[in-house]
Image (spheres, rainbow, N blue to C red):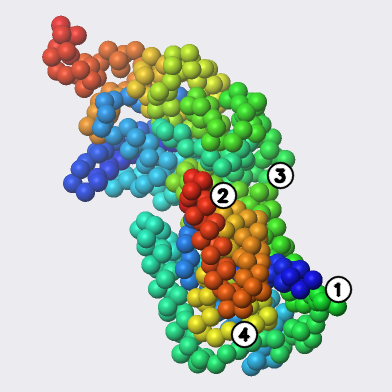
Amino acid sequence: MIFLNQLLQGVFLGGYYALIACSLSFLFGVMRIVNLAHGSIVVLAAFLLFVLADRFEISPWLALIAVVPAMAALGWLLQRFVLDRALRGGLLVPLLATFGLAIVLDNALFETFGADTRSLSPFIGDLSFDSWSLTDDITVGKMDVLILGSAVAMLGAVSLLLARTRIGRAIRATAEDPGTVELIGIDARAVYGMATALALAMAAVAGAFLAMRATFDPYTGGAQLIFAFEAVAIGGFGSLWGTLWGGIALGVAQNVGASIDPSSFFIAGHVTFLAVLVGRVALGRVAA
Amino acid sequence: MLTATGLSKRFGALVVLSDVDFSVRAGEAVGIVGPNGAGKTTLLNILSGTYPPSSGRIAFRGTDVSGLDAAARCRIGIARSHQIPRPFHGMTVFENLLVAARAGGGLRGRAAEQKCLDALGQCGMLKLSNRPGATLGLLDRKRLELARALATGPDVLLLDEIGGGLTDGEAAELVAIILAIRARGIAVVWIEHIVHILVQVVERLVCMDAGRIIAEGDPKSVLRDAAVIDAYLGPSAAHAAVG
């Protein structure tokens, strides 16, 4: 029973990883932009929500209504003034540009907010600790269910957007061949701008849940980036639903590892990631 | 309908086009021939807005469009196809057209779908609608390139060596499609090395060499022009042909 519980909690933890990986998976898998600032951007959104909740006493849910569009606008600016130039410089330049951005963001947050650890959990009432008891041994946190549900909803929404809508098809076509879409009347720069805006809007949602389920400080971004990246890689680059399975695989591996030996929580996740990567290369199916 | 005056293009010190005047009337089919490096593709790129000219201006239906980029020109009715077909591999043939009809043609919903079906039918591709772009052979890729350009609802279609690499039978199919497009009143500007398929479609031929137009007019007389033979085969051949 305890093992089953570990497995279940691993699935929910994986839901969280999938949620923070949505934005990365979309930018990386669909738009072919490696965003090393992803973790820092998620933490930035968390701080924005914290400021609104702490100083202005706005409920984090309500604050999201303001922060999501603000982050989308930031995404558009990021594309226009940083990524657009960087992308023209080949593969390495966006990597360096977003790495630099991560350093700037982390330290700007440190400068502004100091090293204190923060959390949004005091602002959301019972939700942060409420749970349903399924059996004597198994309880399911309400927040965990909400996070897994949000991950599924967000990945589903993006998949539908890409498959079915006008802008989704324009995004797919532009990601594949930015030169040719100009000839069929699509402004590639505008499409890239919208895609990055969408990615940062998703990062804002991820930041909200990061801040509600746990604590964060200005340097939390790095770890979030690694987990998100591993979820995307395990699930397969370019596959949005794969990211959900990748996140869950990572979460389950970590929890199972921890139940064998408490100190092997992280290493079990990293080993799974490595095993999947090596397995793909061995089978000659690495998609990058 | 599409009129370019005094077009020049320099890449650094290299002059690729110098003072070219070029125009197409509504519904007209114009062929462009010339040796490699004559500036044909550069002219097409400037007409389509891929890059701006170093000097000169371009008017479309009486309005100056010199400042518009390729996407904006496509939306007002100037479409072009690539020399090497570039389908969106990850999309079906129908989706390839749908993006074009919506973005380039500004159509929505049913109207966009109908436009795609028309263009597919016109290019004989209806059966291939659900095939992924990546799985098409060369002729079908060329047809897709044409169909996708048609889906944007152009008034002028700029074709860059669409006949290259095809067998005679395949080229004949392509000619039939382009003739049908013309019959719909869409003007065609076509660069082609394979002159014998070009002359089946065009009513006016322009010959370029070294960034200039050296002859233009009725296809037969242009092909007999001494300067044209000179450009293709060298001065002695011209002498022999005239003599």
Chain to which mark 4 belongs: A
User: Which residue occupies the foreground of this view, A205 or B228?
Assistant: A205
Q: CA distance from mark 4 to mark 1?
A: 27 Å
Badge 4 crowding class, 10 Å Cα cut-off, few under 14, some 14 to 19, many 20 or more, is some
The earlier-in-sequence mark between 4 and 1 is 1
Q: Which residue is mark 1?
A: A134
Q: Quadrant of residue A146?
A: bottom right
Q: Quadrant of residue A264?
A: bottom right
Q: Is residue A283 visible?
A: yes
The earlier-in-sequence mark between 2 and 1 is 1
Residue occupying the point 53% across, 65% down: A271
Q: Which residue is mark 2?
A: A172
The answer to whether dots 4 and 1 both sit on one chain is yes
From this view, report whether residue B116 is shown above or below residue A213.
above
Query: From the viewer's perspective, is the residue at label 3 or at label 4 nearer?
Result: 4
Q: CA distance from mark 2 to mark 1?
A: 43 Å
Q: Which residue is mark 4?
A: A215
Total marks drawn? 4
Badge 1 crowding class, 10 Å Cα cut-off, few under 14, some 14 to 19, many 20 or more, is few
Q: CA distance from mark 3 to mark 4?
A: 47 Å
Residue B158: where, in percent of width, then height?
44, 33
Residue B186: where, in percent of width, then height?
53, 29
